[in-house]
Protein backbone atom coordinates (compact mmCIF):
# COMPACT_ATOMS: atom_id res chain seq x y z
CA UNK A 1 0.00 0.00 0.00
CA UNK A 2 2.88 2.42 0.70
CA UNK A 3 4.07 2.15 -2.90
CA UNK A 4 0.61 3.01 -4.17
CA UNK A 5 0.38 5.95 -1.76
CA UNK A 6 3.84 7.16 -2.84
CA UNK A 7 2.90 7.07 -6.52
CA UNK A 8 -0.40 8.79 -5.76
CA UNK A 9 1.50 11.64 -4.08
CA UNK A 10 4.06 11.83 -6.92
CA UNK A 11 1.33 12.16 -9.54
CA UNK A 12 -0.68 14.62 -7.42
CA UNK A 13 2.44 16.80 -7.35
CA UNK A 14 2.78 16.43 -11.13
CA UNK A 15 -0.89 17.30 -11.63
CA UNK A 16 -0.69 20.36 -9.40
CA UNK A 17 2.50 21.57 -11.07
CA UNK A 18 0.51 21.76 -14.28
CA UNK A 19 -2.56 23.27 -12.62
CA UNK A 20 -0.36 25.97 -11.08
CA UNK A 21 1.72 26.82 -14.14
CA UNK A 22 -0.81 26.47 -16.97
CA UNK A 23 -2.98 29.38 -15.75
CA UNK A 24 0.20 31.43 -15.29
CA UNK A 25 0.87 30.86 -19.00
CA UNK A 26 -2.68 32.09 -19.62
CA UNK A 27 -1.82 35.32 -17.77
CA UNK A 28 1.28 35.84 -19.92
CA UNK A 29 -0.62 35.04 -23.09
CA UNK A 30 -3.47 37.43 -22.22
CA UNK A 31 -0.89 40.18 -21.57
CA UNK A 32 1.12 39.57 -24.75
CA UNK A 33 0.64 41.68 -27.84
CA UNK A 34 3.34 39.99 -29.96
CA UNK A 35 2.28 37.17 -32.25
CA UNK A 36 5.61 35.31 -31.93
CA UNK A 37 5.33 35.33 -28.13
CA UNK A 38 1.72 34.16 -28.35
CA UNK A 39 2.78 31.35 -30.68
CA UNK A 40 5.42 30.18 -28.19
CA UNK A 41 2.91 30.39 -25.32
CA UNK A 42 0.36 28.32 -27.30
CA UNK A 43 3.02 25.64 -27.80
CA UNK A 44 3.97 25.72 -24.11
CA UNK A 45 0.30 25.47 -23.11
CA UNK A 46 -0.29 22.42 -25.32
CA UNK A 47 2.80 20.60 -24.08
CA UNK A 48 2.19 21.41 -20.43
CA UNK A 49 -1.43 20.33 -20.76
CA UNK A 50 -0.26 16.92 -21.97
CA UNK A 51 1.90 16.38 -18.88
CA UNK A 52 -0.87 17.77 -16.65
CA UNK A 53 -3.35 15.32 -18.17
CA UNK A 54 -1.00 12.40 -17.49
CA UNK A 55 -0.33 13.52 -13.92
CA UNK A 56 -4.02 14.02 -13.22
CA UNK A 57 -5.04 10.69 -14.71
CA UNK A 58 -2.39 8.76 -12.78
CA UNK A 59 -3.17 10.63 -9.54
CA UNK A 60 -6.80 9.60 -9.93
CA UNK A 61 -5.93 5.99 -10.79
CA UNK A 62 -3.65 5.60 -7.77
CA UNK A 63 -6.18 7.43 -5.56
CA UNK A 64 -8.96 5.09 -6.62
CA UNK A 65 -6.62 2.16 -6.01
CA UNK A 66 -5.94 3.42 -2.47
CA UNK A 67 -9.65 3.73 -1.73
CA UNK A 68 -10.21 0.23 -3.12
CA UNK A 69 -7.57 -1.09 -0.70
CA UNK A 70 -8.91 0.96 2.23
CA UNK A 71 -12.68 1.23 1.66
CA UNK A 72 -13.12 2.10 5.36
CA UNK A 73 -11.93 5.62 4.42
CA UNK A 74 -15.26 6.07 2.65
CA UNK A 75 -16.93 6.04 6.10
CA UNK A 76 -15.07 9.21 7.07
CA UNK A 77 -16.42 12.73 6.61
CA UNK A 78 -12.99 14.09 5.74
CA UNK A 79 -12.79 11.67 2.79
CA UNK A 80 -16.22 12.70 1.51
CA UNK A 81 -15.16 16.35 1.60
CA UNK A 82 -11.80 15.52 -0.01
CA UNK A 83 -13.58 13.71 -2.84
CA UNK A 84 -15.84 16.74 -3.39
CA UNK A 85 -12.71 18.91 -3.66
CA UNK A 86 -11.12 16.43 -6.08
CA UNK A 87 -14.22 16.65 -8.27
CA UNK A 88 -13.77 20.43 -8.15
CA UNK A 89 -10.16 19.99 -9.27
CA UNK A 90 -11.30 17.80 -12.15
CA UNK A 91 -13.75 20.52 -13.24
CA UNK A 92 -10.96 23.12 -12.96
CA UNK A 93 -8.69 20.88 -15.07
CA UNK A 94 -11.40 20.49 -17.73
CA UNK A 95 -11.86 24.27 -17.71
CA UNK A 96 -8.12 24.63 -18.33
CA UNK A 97 -8.40 22.22 -21.27
CA UNK A 98 -11.17 24.37 -22.74
CA UNK A 99 -9.13 27.53 -22.21
CA UNK A 100 -6.11 26.02 -23.97
CA UNK A 101 -8.39 25.29 -26.92
CA UNK A 102 -9.70 28.85 -26.87
CA UNK A 103 -6.15 30.23 -26.83
CA UNK A 104 -5.26 27.95 -29.75
CA UNK A 105 -8.17 29.36 -31.75
CA UNK A 106 -7.65 32.97 -30.62
CA UNK A 107 -11.07 33.06 -28.92
CA UNK A 108 -10.11 34.03 -25.37
CA UNK A 109 -11.97 37.08 -24.05
CA UNK A 110 -10.76 37.16 -20.42
CA UNK A 111 -8.20 39.69 -19.24
CA UNK A 112 -4.87 38.89 -17.62
CA UNK A 113 -6.40 40.09 -14.31
CA UNK A 114 -9.17 37.49 -14.61
CA UNK A 115 -6.55 34.80 -15.25
CA UNK A 116 -4.57 35.95 -12.20
CA UNK A 117 -7.63 35.24 -10.04
CA UNK A 118 -8.34 32.01 -11.91
CA UNK A 119 -4.76 30.94 -11.11
CA UNK A 120 -5.48 31.01 -7.35
CA UNK A 121 -8.14 28.27 -7.29
CA UNK A 122 -5.85 25.22 -7.29
CA UNK A 123 -3.77 26.65 -4.42
CA UNK A 124 -6.87 27.04 -2.25
CA UNK A 125 -8.03 23.52 -3.14
CA UNK A 126 -4.59 22.06 -2.44
CA UNK A 127 -4.45 23.61 1.03
CA UNK A 128 -7.92 22.29 1.83
CA UNK A 129 -7.13 18.76 0.59
CA UNK A 130 -3.82 18.53 2.45
CA UNK A 131 -5.39 19.78 5.68
CA UNK A 132 -8.21 17.26 5.36
CA UNK A 133 -5.88 14.34 4.71
CA UNK A 134 -3.39 15.20 7.43
CA UNK A 135 -5.74 16.44 10.16
CA UNK A 136 -8.78 14.24 9.41
CA UNK A 137 -10.96 16.74 11.31
CA UNK A 138 -14.20 14.74 10.99
Image (cartoon, grey):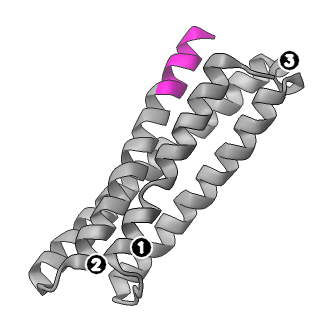
Sequence order check: which comes first, mark 1 or mark 3?
A: 3
The answer to whether 102 is drawn above or below residue 84 in the figure is below
Look at mark 3 in the image and give the residue it sits on.
Answer: 72
Quarter location, residue 114: bottom left
Element carrying mark 2 = helix
Region rendered in magenta: 1-9
Using residue 26 as the reference point, say whether residue 10 is left or right of it. right
Using residue 126 as the reference point, say whether residue 31 is left or right of it. left
Badge nearest the viewer, 2 or 3 = 2
Q: Are marks 1 and 2 in contact (CB under 8 Å)?
A: yes
Q: Residue furthest right?
A: 75
Look at mark 2 in the image and give the residue it sits on.
Answer: 30
Q: Position of residue 124 (x, y in %)?
A: 53, 45
Magenta highlight on residue 117: no
- Residue drawn at (89%, 23%), measured in percent from left and top? 75
Magenta highlight on residue 4: yes
- Residue drawn at (45%, 54%), measured in percent from left and top? 120
Q: Position of residue 132 (x, y in %)?
A: 66, 27
Look at mark 1 in the image and give the residue it sits on.
Answer: 114
Amino acid sequence: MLWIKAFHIIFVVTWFAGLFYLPRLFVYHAMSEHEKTQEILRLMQRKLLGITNIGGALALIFGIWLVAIMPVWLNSGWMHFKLVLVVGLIFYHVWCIKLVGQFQRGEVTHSHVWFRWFNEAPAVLLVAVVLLVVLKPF
